[in-house]
Amino acid sequence: MCNPAAAAGGQVYGGALSAYGQYQQGKLNSQYYNYLADRTKDQVEEVDKATRENLALNADDAARAVKQTRQESKEIGETQRAVMAANGVYSDSSTFHDIQDDTAMKQNEDEAAILHNADRVAWQTKRNAINQKANLYAEESSYRIQASNAKQAAKINAIGTLVGSAAGAGATMNRS
């Protein structure tokens, strides 16, 4: 038969190795979840960058569209003046001014519509960014909690293994 002290020592040694392995695995899991949390935080920065770029592009597109609308309106006004002059409509007549005023009003309406649409797109871009960031912050928080839980579970499991192997060793010693 085996020496009870040697058997008890083997149980304690095996338990200690197992506990160490559990603790190390918990640390690795914690590091992994912290890594995922850090990558998620990086994604928040990418969302911010993409949002800034999209807002700048939207503003540039709106400015270009307003400029184009003004140029088209100017060309239409010039064409109208030439056509009215060719048809004998005087530049000081009410018809001439009504047509020119109507063209200017339509230009203003077009510009307002372009700017309104640009504002709507900007608002939606910002709203989407806020939602994406909220989801990413929640995901990051979840990973940080999982990292903490992994460490805590590893400690609890390691302690349980040590206590269990010590109890087993004690039982082995009492049987002899």
Image (cartoon, helix red, strand yellow):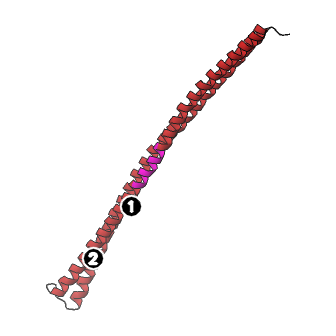
Instruction: Please state, as top left, top right, bottom left or bottom right, where the C terminus lies in the image.
Output: top right
Task: Name the residue furthest left.
Answer: 92
User: How many numbered circles are shown?
Assistant: 2
Q: Using the image as rendered, state which of residue 23 and residue 166 is in the foreground.
A: 166
Mark 2, residues whose alpha carbon is within 10 Å: few (<14), some, or many (≥20)?
some
Q: Is residue 142 left or right of residue 62?
A: right
Which label is found at residue 121?
1
Decide if residue 141 is in sight here: yes
Residue ranking furthest to the bottom: 87
Magenta-tinted stretch: 127-137
> Residue at horizontal 39%, vertical 57%?
57
The single residue placed furthest to the front in the displayed view is 175
Residue 94 against residue 22 in the figure, above or below: below
Amino acid at circle 1: Val
Quick check: is 134 in the magenta stretch? yes
Badge 2 is on which residue?
106
Mark 1: which secondary structure? helix
Q: Is residue 13 visible?
A: no
Residue at 51% in and 38% down? 37
What element does badge 2 sit on?
helix
> Residue 93: horizontal and vertical position, in percent?
15, 87
Percent position of residue 11, x then y? 73, 16
* Residue plotted at (60% across, 32% down): 29
Closer to the camera in the image, 103 or 87 = 103
Where is residue 54 drawn, in percent x and y?
41, 55
Query: At label 2, which amino acid type do we have?
Result: Lys
Residue 58's spot in the image, x, y percent?
A: 38, 59
